Structures are given as C-alpha cells and as structure tokens.
Image: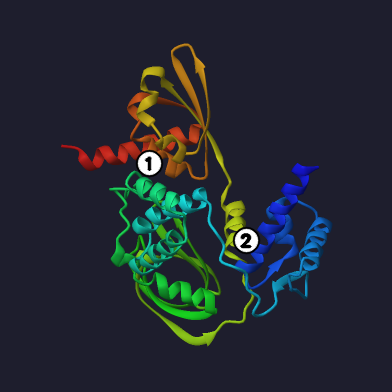
C-alpha cells in the first residue's frame, strides 16, 4: 500500500510539473506519458484540485494552470542535472552558436541551485564527457545561421521566404514556406515545410539555405505535427527489399557498424560463412555501399541487385580503362 501511495504521489508531482512547463496539455498526452487510462487521468486531476492546485479545464479535455499560479523553484536531482550536462555537450557540437550559448546559460542556472556536493559531482563529470564531430560530415556553425529564425517562424506560425540550393542539381530557387518543424539526422539539420509554390510538403537541408527571412503573414492552414509528418513519410517510403549476402567469418568485422546503416536485421552461421540479411528501402543505395565490401562477400539474393552491381561495375571499368 505504501509503495502504491508513493508511486501515485510521484505521478501527481510529475503531472504538476508538466502543467507548470506547458501552457496547455491534453488528457491524452498525460495518459500516454504514464501509460494509464483517461479515467485515471481525470481522477489525478481531481486529486490535484482537491490539494488546492487551480487547474483550468479547457475545451477538448485540455488543462492549464490558472494565470499567475506559482510554486517554489523546482529542485533537480543529481541524475537530472547530469542529463542536462550531457545534452549541453551535444548542443555545443550540433547546434548553432545562439542556441548553444542559450543552453549553456540555462545549464549554469541549473547548477546555481544545486547542493554543493552535486555541483562538485558535475564539475568532475564535465571533464569526462565529449561529443565529437563526424569528420566526414562536420556540422559547421556558419551553415546553421538561420536556425534561430526558423525556430521563431515555427513558434509564431510565420511564412518564411527562403532561397535554396538543391543538393544534387545545384539549381537555386526562392520559395515561400509554411514551416512545421526541424529535425537532426546523419549530421545534418533539416526543415520540413509546406511549399506554397509546389502546394505540397518539402524537405530542405538547412545548410543549403542561401537566404531566409520571415514574412509578416501568418499561415492559418492546418498542418500535421512534425512527429505525425515523419511517421506518415516513414510508412510511404518504406517499401523494403530483402537482401541476403554471404561473408567469410574472418571478414565480417570489415563491415563494422556500417552494416546497420545498410539495413542489417539478422545473421546466421553456416560452416565458415556468415549469412547476413538486410532490409533496404533502396537497392541502388545498397549497391553503392556494397562496393566497399564486394571483394569480401557474395550476393545470394536478389538477382536484380547482382545485375545492378555488374552493370555499374562495367560502367566504372569503361571510365578507368587505361
């Protein structure tokens, strides 16, 4: 009984923290966060109200705290503070200077309210955490100069005008975009937005944006959240191809972690060989990566991949023929 009461108290405290951190939060979000039913959410909200917390019930089962309601400053645990310190290392390497400096300032404020023992712990830990750049795909500060403007445009729902250089064709174009979000993947920042020129959603690499400014016009069109959009495109794009290759046991190490980027799903051993199975969204993309290891492996299936690699190999031979 004591454990159940402690668990519920922790949950009520966490819900109150969520209400303090957000202007508004839905019952569904709370239910998903704590893996519980909506009925339990309603019961917890009533418990907080009974304890004197002024919760405003918004339309659509949304909740917010009454304007002006304040609690004493939240104290961070040692583990929470260490998590912020680790995140700061990522921000120093992967974000633009403005965002990185703002995050550094926030971490200093967090440190200022810690107990002396926890400050000493973080100071010691600080010297033993590092986030290194990918030397082949470095994140350059000058390539992220538009990131603060983009985030402001997303938050304020402002149309942005940008001039963009296409990654492959190098052609330049100017578009008006209704931004829905940004994300970081494979050492690159990407902007997702609704293109008013193409009347469709488009993805832009932020380091390829030549110029950008926010227009006074606010967009009223309803867009999916970034999470919803990425989930939709993931379903659309993932027509996966099963690829099976054979590699000698002594040569498997050559693929290292690269195999995971190629869609590796399983391996099994046959005598002196290892049979590797991949699920790849693109045979062409897999073929290009395969050339690094073709000397040490054999394609079992599909036949179409074998044909593609042979044809590409012949083209390469013609180019380098002495």
* Disc marking residue 228: 2
On the rendered image, what quadrant is the C terminus found in? top left
**Where is residue 272, by image quadrant?**
top left
The correct choice, above or below, for 305 with respect to 95 in the image is above
Q: Nearer the viewer, mark 1 or mark 2?
A: 2
Residue 166 in sight from this viewpoint:
no
Residue 302, image x, y percentages = 51, 32
Residue 169 as seen in the image, left or right of residue 220: left
Task: Give the residue number, with chain letter if any, for mark 1.
Answer: 288
Q: Residue furthest front?
A: 116
Measured Cα–Cα span from mark 1 to mark 2: 31 Å
205 or 88: nearer the viewer: 88
Q: Identify the image quadrant of residue 4.
A: top right
Residue 211, quarter of the rendered image:
bottom left
Say the numbered circle drawn on residue 170: none
Rendered location of residue 140, percent (x, y):
30, 60
Q: Position of residue 91 (x, y in %)?
A: 39, 58
Q: Which residue ends up furthest to the bottom in the rendered image?
A: 216
**Residue at point 47%, 57% (across, down):** 114
- SS label for mark 2: helix
Q: Nearer the viewer, residue 28 or 241?
A: 28
Q: Earlier in the sequence, mark 1 or mark 2?
A: 2
Q: Residue at x 38, y 46 (%)?
A: 125
Q: Looking at the picture, how far across and down is residue 212, in whole percent?
A: 38, 77
| Mark 1 neighbour density, 10 Å: few (under 14) some (14–19) many (20 or more) | few
Task: Give the quarter of the figure containing the N terminus.
Answer: top right
Q: Nearer the viewer, residue 74 or 176?
A: 74
Q: Is residue 298 above or below residue 73?
A: above
Q: On screen, 198 above or below 12?
A: below
Which residue ends up furthest to the top in the rendered image?
Answer: 271
* Residue closest to the eye, 118 or 287: 118
Mark 1 residue element: helix
């Amino acid at each position: 009984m004591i454990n159940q009461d402690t668990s519920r108290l922790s949950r009520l405290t966490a819900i109150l923290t969520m209400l303090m951190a957000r202007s508004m939060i839905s019952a569904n979000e709370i239910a998903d966060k704590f893996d519980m039913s909506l009925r339990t959410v309603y019961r917890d909200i009533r418990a907080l109200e009974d304890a004197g917390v002024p919760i405003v019930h918004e339309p659509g089962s949304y909740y917010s705290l009454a304007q002006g309601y304040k609690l004493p400053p939240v104290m961070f645990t040692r583990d929470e503070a260490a998590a912020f310190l680790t995140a700061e290392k990522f921000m120093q390497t992967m974000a633009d200077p403005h965002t990185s400096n703002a995050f550094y300032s926030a971490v200093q404020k967090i440190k200022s309210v810690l107990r002396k023992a926890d400050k000493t712990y973080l100071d010691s830990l600080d010297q033993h955490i590092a986030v290194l750049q990918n030397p082949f795909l470095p994140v350059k500060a000058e390539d992220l100069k538009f990131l603060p403007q983009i985030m402001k445009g997303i938050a304020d729902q402002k149309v942005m005008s940008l001039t963009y250089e296409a990654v492959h064709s190098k052609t330049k174009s100017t578009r008006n975009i209704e931004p829905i979000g940004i994300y970081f993947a494979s050492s690159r920042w990407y902007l997702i937005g609704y293109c008013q020129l193409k009347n469709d959603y488009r993805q832009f690499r932020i380091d390829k944006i030549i110029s950008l400014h926010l227009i006074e016009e606010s967009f009223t069109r309803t867009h999916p959240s970034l999470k919803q959009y990425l989930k939709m495109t993931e379903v659309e794009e993932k027509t996966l191809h099963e690829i099976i290759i054979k590699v000698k046991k002594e040569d498997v190490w050559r693929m290292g972690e690269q195999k995971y980027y190629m869609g590796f799903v399983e391996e099994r051993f046959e005598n002196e060989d290892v049979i590797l199975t991949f699920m790849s969204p693109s045979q062409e993309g897999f073929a290009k990566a395969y050339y690094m290891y073709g000397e040490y492996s054999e394609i079992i299936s599909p036949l179409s991949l074998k044909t593609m690699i042979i044809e590409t190999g012949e083209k390469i031979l013609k180019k380098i023929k002495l």
